[in-house]
Image (cartoon, rainbow, N blue to C red):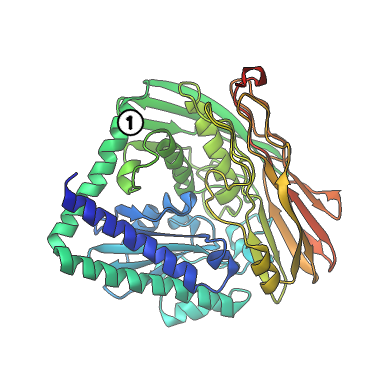
Amino acid sequence: MNVELQVIGSALRAIAEEMGAALVRSAFSANIKERRDCSTAIFDEAGRMIAQAEHIPVHLGAMPDAVAAVMRLGLEPGELAILNDPYTGGTHLPDVTLVSRTALGYAVSRAHHADVGGMEPASLPAFSRELYQEGLVLPPVLLTREVEELFVANARNPDERRGDLRAQIAAHRLAERRIDELCARRGRERVAAAMDELYAYSERMVRAAIAALPDGRWEAEDVVEALEGELPIRCAVEVAGDEVRIDFAGTAPQHAGNLNCPLSVTRSACFFVVRCLTEPDLPASGGAFAPVAVTAPEGCLVNARPPAAVVAGNTETSSRIVDVVFRAFGEALPVPAQGQGTMNNVALGNGSFTYYETIGGGQGACPDADGPSGVHVAMSNTLITPVEALELAYPLRVERWSLRAGSGGAGARRGGDGVVRELRVLEDCRLSVLAERRARAPRGAAGGGDGAPGRTLVNGEEQPAKVTRQLRAGDLLRIETPGGGGFGAPSAAP
C-alpha cells in the first residue's frame, strides 16, 4: 500500500474513533459513558463499510444491513435516519442506530439505550414472546423532531434517553465535518479512490489468509439453554480456495421466547470468528467479510422471521454461534478452548431508574497461553460500570466484586477465571437476567478441563439462566460468571 493510501486510511479510522469518543464523552447514561456499549463506523457511497472503531463485534457486523435499509430513504446531506428494528439491520431493540449522509457516503453509530419501553424496565425481559413486548420498534425513518419525541415518550427515564440520543447526533455532526476537512485536504476524488482500495485491500488480505487454510468441510453442534429445554445450533463450515461458507441447516426452529437471531446478527458472529482465524490485526472494513457466505434456513433460531422476540438472541445466541463455528473450525485448525460463552446480562429498574450491565468471565486457554480472567468474551467488548459511578447514579450497592478463583478449567494452559459480582438493591425494583452456560460448562480443548458453569442467585436461592422477577429493597443479587476451558492435558504443563 502506498503512503497516501495509508495516510487516508488512518484518517478515516481516526474519524470513526473520534465519533466513538465524542459519543462516550457526551452520553448521559452509564451504559454508554462508562460501559461504552456503542459502536461507530464510516461507509462509502455504495453502502460499504470502510472504517470502523474497535467497538462491539455484534454491532459492527450487522451495520451494513442497516445502511442498506436506510439508503432506500434517499438521505440528503444534513439528514439523519434512525432505526432499531432487528429485521432491517438492527440487533435488538435497545441498540439504536443512527445513519447520516456525509460528503463521501455515510456515518453510522449504534448505542445501547438503557430503556426503549416494553414490558420490563431496561427492555430486557426474560419472558418476551413477541418483538413488540421488548420495546418501541423503529423501522428506518428520518429522525425528525416528531420522531425524537415519539422515541422519548415511549421510554422510561426520558431525559436520559434524550441525552443519549443527542450524544449520538453530536457524533454524527462531528463525522460530517471531519469528512469535509479530509476532502478539502486530500481531494474528494482521491479520498473516494482510497475508500475503494481500502475495501479491496481488506478483501485481498482475508482471501489470501483463507487460501492458506486447508480445504474441507467440518461440522459442529452446541446448545442454547432455553427455559423449555435445550435448543441445538448446528453448523457446517466449508473452506474452498479463498472462500468460506457457513451453513446452519439442522438448527432448531425459531424459539417461542426471545433467543432468536435475525440473520444479520448470525452473520456478525460468523464474521467475527473468520476474522479471528485469518487476519485479526487487519484494520476492519467490509471487505474482510466479502469472502464469507452465511446461510441458514428461514424460520430457524438463527434466521428468525418477524415478529419473533430477539432480545436474548443478540447477546446469548450470538455467543453460542461463535462457540459452534469455532468448534467446527477446530476440526482442522488449532482454536482456543471455549470462553464463558455468555454476556451475563443484568437489568434492574423501576419507575425512576433503569440500569443495565454485562459481566465478564473467563476466556478459554490457547495452545500457547493461559486464558485471561474477568474479560468480556467474543461478541461483547464492553467495560463494567465502575463501582463509584454505579453507586452514585443508581439505588444499588456493590457488595462484592472479585475474581472467581479456580473457576477456569485445568490444563497445560489454564482457562481464565470468571468473576463474582454482588449487587444489593436499595429500592423495590424489577430484575431481569439473561445468561447462558449455567447448565453446560464451557468446554476445554485437547484434553483440557472444562471451566466452571455460571450461577445466578437471589438472597442465596439459585435462579434459572433466564429470569425476570420482583426484588424488594435489601435483596441481594449474586452473579458467578463461568470460567474458560483449559487447553491440553494438565500433565503436559511445562
| Residue 41 located left or right of residue 334 | left
Q: Is residue 242 above or below residue 115?
A: above
The quarter of the picture where residue 389 lies is bottom right
Residue at far front of view:
494
Rendered location of residue 358, percent (x, y): 62, 54
Q: Is residue 113 visible?
A: yes
**Closest to the observer: 233 or 285?**
285
Task: Name the residue rendered at 58%, 75% in the picture.
Answer: 154
Q: Which residue is mark 1?
A: 209
Quadrant in which the C terminus is drawn: top right
Residue 382: x percent and y percent?
55, 55
Quadrant into which the N terminus falls: top left
Q: How many marks?
A: 1
User: Quick one: label 1, few (<14), some, or many (20+) residues within 10 Å?
Assistant: some
Judge from the rendering whether residue 263 lies leftward or rightward of residue 460; answer left or right: left
* Amino acid type of the residue tagged 1 in the rendering: Ala
Identify which residue is drawn at 36% across, 58% down.
41
Q: Quadrant of residue 274?
A: top left
In the image, is residue 445 above or below residue 141? Answer: above
Q: Position of residue 32 (x, y in %)?
A: 54, 65
From this viewpoint, is residue 98 visible? Answer: no
Say which residue appears at 24% left-offset and 42% top-offset. Answer: 201
Q: Position of residue 267 (x, y in %)?
A: 44, 43
Whether residue 301 is situated above or below residue 164 in the rendered picture? above
For this rendering, which residue is in front, 306 or 365?
Answer: 365
The answer to which of 209 and 294 lies nearer the viewer is: 209
Between residues 322 and 130, which one lies in front from this camera angle? 322
Q: Secondary structure at mark 1?
A: helix
Quadrant in which residue 270 is drawn: top left
